[in-house]
């Protein structure tokens, strides 16, 4: 795949490659694409969550209940 960029964008990409430790401009562009994919997945999860009805209020009592469950949870062998 070849991508044409105006000189100002090409210069920006070249600067990012040099300043941020990328080996090539392709590596930089791949990283941008991966980040955009992550952003789109997160947006989908957030929108799906926003479309569901709340299950329980998230207030101080909710967080205290979580803390209590952690306190009561059996210690695993790795926690010593």
Image (spheres, rainbow, N blue to C red):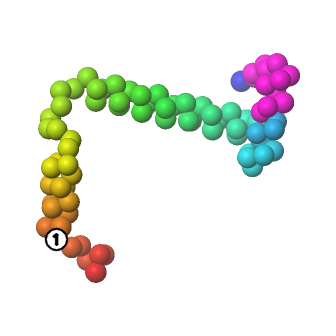
Q: Quadrant of the N terminus?
A: top right
Foreground pick, 58 / 33: 58
User: 59 above or below 79?
Assistant: above
Tell me: residue 2, above or below residue 25: above
Count of picture labels: 1
Residue closer to the observer: 15 or 58: 58
Task: Report if residue 39 is visible in the image.
Answer: yes
Q: Residue at x 82, y 19 (%)?
A: 6
Q: Residue at x 49, y 35 (%)?
A: 38
Q: Is residue 12 magenta?
A: yes
Q: Secondary structure at mark 1?
A: loop
Q: Position of residue 32 (x, y in %)?
A: 63, 34
Tell me where the magenta segment starts and ends, as one range. Answer: 2-13
Measuring from the top left, give residue 23's x and y in whole percent.
77, 46
Name the residue carrying label 1: 74
Residue that lies at the very extreme toward the front in this rendered image: 60
**Within the image, what quadrant is residue 4 found in?**
top right
Residue at x-position 26% and y-position 77%: 77
């Amino acid at each position: 795949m070849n991508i044409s960029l105006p000189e100002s964008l090409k210069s920006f990409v070249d600067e990012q490659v040099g300043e941020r430790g990328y080996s090539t401009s392709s590596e930089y562009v791949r990283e941008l694409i991966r980040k955009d994919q992550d952003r789109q997945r997160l947006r989908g999860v957030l929108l799906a969550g926003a479309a569901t009805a709340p299950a329980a209020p998230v207030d101080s009592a909710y967080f205290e209940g979580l803390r209590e469950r952690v306190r009561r949870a059996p210690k695993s062998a790795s926690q010593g």
